[in-house]
Image (cartoon, rainbow, N blue to C red):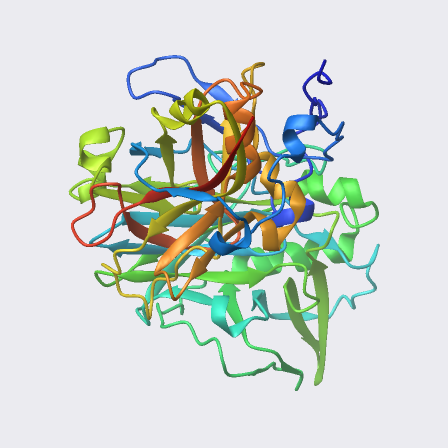
């Protein structure tokens, strides 16, 4: 008898942060007309009890590597695009902020919620100190390739004071909201501008800082904080301060037709709120930090009205030609392989290699709108949970999922998944395809379906028959 099916840890939700820098949670409709939803769980450790059928054809091999190997790529594929419900966005390495509109993907807006914390208790600020300014600064992400998505258009930013306390122990998702006061805290001198992601910044104290976005806040808030700092009522204890000043919501609004989304590193020492003041001719500054103890998350909104996606959602008819993948809790793909189990009718079959090819249409401004870095596949197990296909545990080079320039397609390895489907270890020949770095990058791509007019999505299997 074969060993019983390997079970995944019950804490599947928490650990794909280690693999993809984010933890994903989605409630998705498995079929277009099915009302019930289920959680999309991500992965922790894979506790493996090797099974005899898992070992068959485990290694990737080229077509000519095995005598008698056969090739099939005519399996019927049914596919459609569906919208994800949400993804976890708190405590990530990068925070997205912006507002963008593209003909292919409609509107996406990303806003940031963050707490700021005291840099020192009971600061010693002279009674004669006068306010100069209060500045919130966000350092751009280090990688120049991922600092800005979209176009060099003007963006209007609005900042609101939170009226609800955030907790570092809470989990926040892309659809989470925290109550805020409706008064915009941006200084009256603020003028919308094109983001400058390359030039360094010189402060009024003469400090030269790495490229960053700087928001000058209202003088009224600056004076309030200076007064509170001198009194010390809320500056003597970290929790007292965050109860008094809950945090900030930063919202972006495009001025032109297109807009952009920018990636920030909020854990940089240059990402903070700084209160500038002077006593006579001596300038001073008090910092409010954003650090690992600061609750922070990103909220995403999408609007696909008037785009091809609106009609494509949950349509296998349209999905036969085109599909869409979008990060930021956007769009995913569903694939069913109705004839896959026909291979088992041949008798003993060892899967040497099975690859799903998802070709790109290139129907977008690729210079401004980036593709997702990588795609990965998940499926629903018998417990109703969504888990990764087993191939991912063989490593990046085995599981693939990256874009292949020669093929003009994303290639996802489904070798172990296919073998387990044939052996009925996995019940249904269905998968979902999602983008990696879902909450920290703004990738979007249109792909061809199995009946695409230029290229076709295919499941290519190399197999060997045995007695």
Expressed as whole percent of the image width and height from the top left, the position of residue 224 reads 62, 54
Above or below 77: residue 29 = above
Q: Of residues 94 and 21, which is closer to you in this image?
A: 21
User: Which residue is more in the foreground, 3 or 90?
Assistant: 3
Name the side, left or right, on which 296 lies relative to 418: right
Query: Is residue 434 toward the left or the right of residue 280 in the image?
Result: left
Q: Is residue 241 above or below residue 291?
A: above
Q: Position of residue 2 (x, y in %)?
A: 71, 17
Tell me residue 130's x, y (percent): 65, 71
Against 94, residue 169 (above or below) is above
Q: Please tell me which residue is depicted at 21% across the width and 60% down the height of the picture.
A: 257
The residue positioned 61% from the left and 82% from the top of the image is 204
Q: In which quadrant of the rendered view does residue 90 lie?
A: top right
Closer to the camera in the image, 167 or 440:
440
| Residue 180 seen anywhere in this rendered image of the structure | no
Tag count in the figure?
0
Left or right, 428 with respect to 271, comes to left
- Quarter of the picture holding the C terminus: top right
Q: Is residue 62 visible?
A: yes
Q: Tell me the quarter of the image containing the N terminus.
A: top right
Q: Report which quarter residue 239 is drawn in.
A: top right
- Residue 144: where, in percent of width, then height? 51, 74
Q: Is residue 197 above or below residue 355?
A: below
Which one is in front, 230 or 296?
296
């Amino acid at each position: 008898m074969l060993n019983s099916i390997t079970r995944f840890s019950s804490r599947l939700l928490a650990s794909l942060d280690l693999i993809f820098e984010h933890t994903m949670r989605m409630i998705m409709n498995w079929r277009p007309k099915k009302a019930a939803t289920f959680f999309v769980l991500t992965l922790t450790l894979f506790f493996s009890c090797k099974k005899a059928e898992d070992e068959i054809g485990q290694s990737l091999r080229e077509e000519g590597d095995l005598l008698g190997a056969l090739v099939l790529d005519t399996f019927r594929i049914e596919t459609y695009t569906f919208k994800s419900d949400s993804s976890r966005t708190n405590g990530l390495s990068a925070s997205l902020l912006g507002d963008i509109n593209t003909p292919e993907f409609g509107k996406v807006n990303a806003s940031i919620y963050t707490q700021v914390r005291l840099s020192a208790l009971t600061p010693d600020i002279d009674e004669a100190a006068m306010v100069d300014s209060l500045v919130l600064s966000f350092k751009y992400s280090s990688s120049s390739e991922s600092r800005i998505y979209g176009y060099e258009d003007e963006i209007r930013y609005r900042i609101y004071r939170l009226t609800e306390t955030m907790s570092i122990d809470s989990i926040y998702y892309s659809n989470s909201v925290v109550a805020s006061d409706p008064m915009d805290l941006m200084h009256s001198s603020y003028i919308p501008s094109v983001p400058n992601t390359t030039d360094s910044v010189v402060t009024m104290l003469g400090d030269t800082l790495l490229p960053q976005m700087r928001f000058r806040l209202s003088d009224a808030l600056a004076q309030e904080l200076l007064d509170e700092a001198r009194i010390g009522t809320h500056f003597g204890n970290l929790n007292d301060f965050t109860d008094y000043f809950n945090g900030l919501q930063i919202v972006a609004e495009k001025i032109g037709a297109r807009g952009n989304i920018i990636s920030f590193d909020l854990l940089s020492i240059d990402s903070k709120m700084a209160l500038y003041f002077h006593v006579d001719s001596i300038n001073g500054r008090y910092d409010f930090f954003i650090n690992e103890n600061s609750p922070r998350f990103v909220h995403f909104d999408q609007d696909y009205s008037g785009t091809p996606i609106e009609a494509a959602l949950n349509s296998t008819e349209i999905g036969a030609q085109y599909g869409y993948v979008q990060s930021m809790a956007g769009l995913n793909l569903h694939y069913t392989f109705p004839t896959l189990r026909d291979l088992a009718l041949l008798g003993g079959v060892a899967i040497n290699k099975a690859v799903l090819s998802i070709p790109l249409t290139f129907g977008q401004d690729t210079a401004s709108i980036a593709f997702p870095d990588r795609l990965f596949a998940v499926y629903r197990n018998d417990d109703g949970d969504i888990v990764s296909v087993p191939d991912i545990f063989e490593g990046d080079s085995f599981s693939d999922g990256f874009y292949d320039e020669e093929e003009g397609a994303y290639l996802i390895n489904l070798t172990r998944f296919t073998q387990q489907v044939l052996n009925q270890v996995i019940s249904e020949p269905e998968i979902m395809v999602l983008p990696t770095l879902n909450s920290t990058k703004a990738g979007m791509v249109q792909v061809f379906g199995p009946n695409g007019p230029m290229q076709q999505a295919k499941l290519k299997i190399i197999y060997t028959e045995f007695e």
